[in-house]
Amino acid sequence: MTETYDAVVVGGGPSGATAAHDLARAGYSVALLDKAGRIKPCGGAIPPRAIRDFEIPDHLLVARIRNAQVVSPEGRKVDMPIEGAGYVGMVDRCEFDEWLRVRAAEAGAERHTGSYEKIERDADGTAVVLYYPKGAGEGAPPVRLRTHAVIGADGALSMVGRQCVKGAERVPFVFAYHEIVRAPKTGADWDPDRCDVWYQGKLSPDFYAWVFPHGDTASIGTGSMHKGFSLKGSVAELRKTIGLDGAETIRREGAPIPLKPLKRWDNGRDVILAGDAAGVVAPASGEGIYYAMLGGRLAADAVMELRRTGDARALAGARKRFMKDHGRVFWILGIMQRFWYRSDWTREHFVKMCMDKDVQRLTWESYMNKQLVRKDPLAHVKIFFKDLAHLMGLARA
């Protein structure tokens, strides 16, 4: 080892690639370690806030969504159009993630491809990241990267987190699975400009199933915390229902998705977690790309502060900043998921609530801008009493 990096980032998804890019662009030496060829199951939605904040170019948007349709257990379909000229961008994670990694490399990050093994310590206590390069033969020695800081952005089952951060092994998660299919131009019950969200217990007993367009392809998937639930069977049934059971299947992907931020993201010394490894996927919606990229940016900021000051307390600042801006949203969405997703009776009432124009407007404004809408108090009061009526069973589904 002839070099000691300012940071080694483990994991090259949106969170890790963003962290590596920000560090490299700021002039810090950074190594980005990623497994080649892995694609996370993901609907691929990114809100306008993410496009603005992280400078996502238009050519990565494979579709622009201007409407969402929610489907109830009884088959009620409710359209939720986006008002005005707004839209939600859709990306294909296969192309999107690699573009982010290339951008990080162009900014100066040094790319490494292989499987993370563990973190060791030199005699002076400096961290050394060990990994096995892709294609290394049996018995080949690991590569060693000496570094002042480590950002663990290696997913919901983060090995960095489990080895270094107390409580990282206790994050709850949903098992997600989707199939990318070739989408026909006509003849199927789907719209290339609309996201469909299915709230039916047979498709997911505690989450939802989805059909998200990706231009010439579509992501059809579902998720559940129930280990015995057949995710593949659910997707097969949904494909048959919408008339895409005969469509060409391009690839199948599955992975756990965390649904609650960890109480601690760092080891109080030189390791910090980001993205799925920190648990920052929104409950109820399962949205993760924006929060992952933000988590990567905050982790990079924390490492920069650590390198400038030498004070390890800087690492805790990433979580504090995230929770200050988004903690209340995560808390509200967690309550929504625990109540509204618990039975088909509550799901039916939830979809009925989505017919309300104020619910639609406030939902889109909050989602697209990533902040709670505080204006229009009368609309909030109206929604509150509608919620109460549905909660008490006083409103018809």
Image: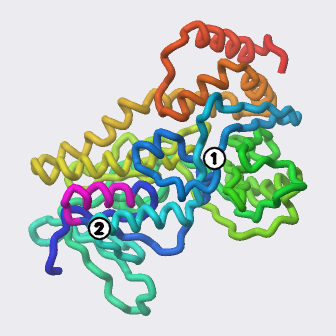
Q: Is residue 146 above or below residue 275?
A: below
- Give the residue displayed 26% in from the left and 40% down from the top: 317
- The secondary structure type at the circle numbered 1 is strand
In this figure, what is the number of numbered marks? 2
Which quadrant is the C terminus positioned in?
top right
Image coords of residue 207 (percent x, y):
68, 42
Does residue 22 show up magenta in the picture?
yes
Label 1 vs label 2, nearer the camera: 1
Decide whether the magenta segment is chiefly helix, strand or loop: helix
Amino acid type, callout 2: Ala
Find disc 1 in the rendering and name its residue: 64
Q: Is residue 210 above or below residue 244?
A: above
Q: Which residues are magenta?
A: 16-29
- The secondary structure type at the circle numbered 2 is loop
Amino acid type, callout 1: Arg
Q: Quick one: 43 or 65, which is closer to the camera?
A: 65
Find disc 2 in the rendering and name its residue: 109
Sequence-wise, which precedes: disc 1 or disc 2?
1
Q: Is residue 154 above or below residue 257?
A: below
- Give the residue displayed 30% in from the left and 42% down from the top: 318
C-alpha distance separating marks 1 and 2 = 31 Å
Image coords of residue 151 (percent x, y):
31, 58
Which quadrant is the N terminus positioned in?
bottom left
Way the structure is coloured:
rainbow
Left-right relation of 60 to 203: left
Left-right relation of 394 to 339: right
- Residue 395 appears in the picture as rendered: yes
